[in-house]
Amino acid sequence: MHLVSVITPVLNSQRTIESTIRSVLEQTYNNIEYIIVDNGSKDRTMDIVNKYKDRISKIIFEDKIGIYTTMNKGIRSANGEIISILNSDDIYADREVIETVVEEMQKKRADACWGDLVYVNRTDPKKIVRYWKSSEIKPEAFIKGWMPPHPTFFVRLWVYKKYGFFKTEFKIAADYEIMLRFLY
């Protein structure tokens, strides 16, 4: 059974972090290393995280290192064969997400995969505001700005080790750049 490392970068997410944590801890797949990297929260975020500290594999504290450095810190501390980054305001849509991903990656011998993403209303999570439908990779789509949404992106750790981590000099586009490097 493959170890999956789920990394949640967080900064001042007291409104959403509990839902994020629960969506990871309630997964049916039971070989998960859960890593939370806090980037200097000043609200009640860490009080909420600490309620679950016995079920979280690692809690790393940093201060104002930036989102992509936070993600890199989590990846570098991960032991899992498969890496997922789930932001502190995201949740897995159901309890079988990780189990399904691992099964599909094994069946297809894939090094990376992604899926559909549902955007919901911030105040009413039952209200869908956009549905991003997953598809096979089309290299020409990258030229037009397409990329898989990183909350649905799962990739083997060896890919990060071989092709590199998030380039922090890209302040708002490091996720796009890493997808180009990994997939294009």
Image: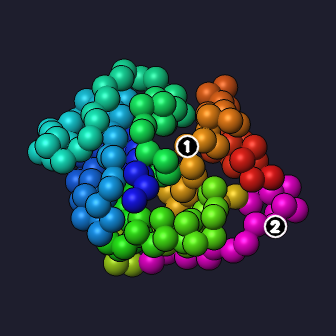
Instruction: Please provide percent x and percent y for residue 25.
Output: 25, 58
Please name the amino acid that badge 2 sits on.
Answer: Lys
- The segment highlighted magenta reads 128-146
**Which circle marks residue 138 in the picture?**
2
Residue drawn at (54%, 56%) of the image: 154
Q: Is residue 117 visible?
A: no
| Left or right of 137 on screen, residue 58 | left
Residue 172 or residue 85, whichever sits in front:
85
* 173 lies above or below 108: above
Instruction: Please provide percent x and percent y for residue 59.
Output: 27, 34
Residue 27 or residue 67, whichever sits in front:
27
Task: Name the quarter where the N terminus is drawn.
Answer: bottom left
Of the two numbered discs 1 and 2 on the same chain, state the one appearing first in sequence.
2
| Left or right of 44 on screen, residue 23 | right
Please name the amino acid that badge 1 sits on.
Answer: Leu
The residue tagged with tag 2: helix, strand or loop? loop
Whether 139 is among the magenta residues is yes
User: What residue is shown with label 1?
Assistant: 157
Toward which corner of the image does residue 170 lie, by quadrant? Answer: top right
Q: Residues within 10 Å of mark 2 (few under 14, many from 20)?
A: few
The residue tagged with tag 1: helix, strand or loop? helix
Residue drawn at (75%, 43%) of the image: 181
Residue 57 or residue 64, whichever sits in front:
57
Toward which corner of the image does residue 162 lie, by quadrant? Answer: top right
Instruction: Please provide percent x and percent y for residue 133.
Output: 62, 76
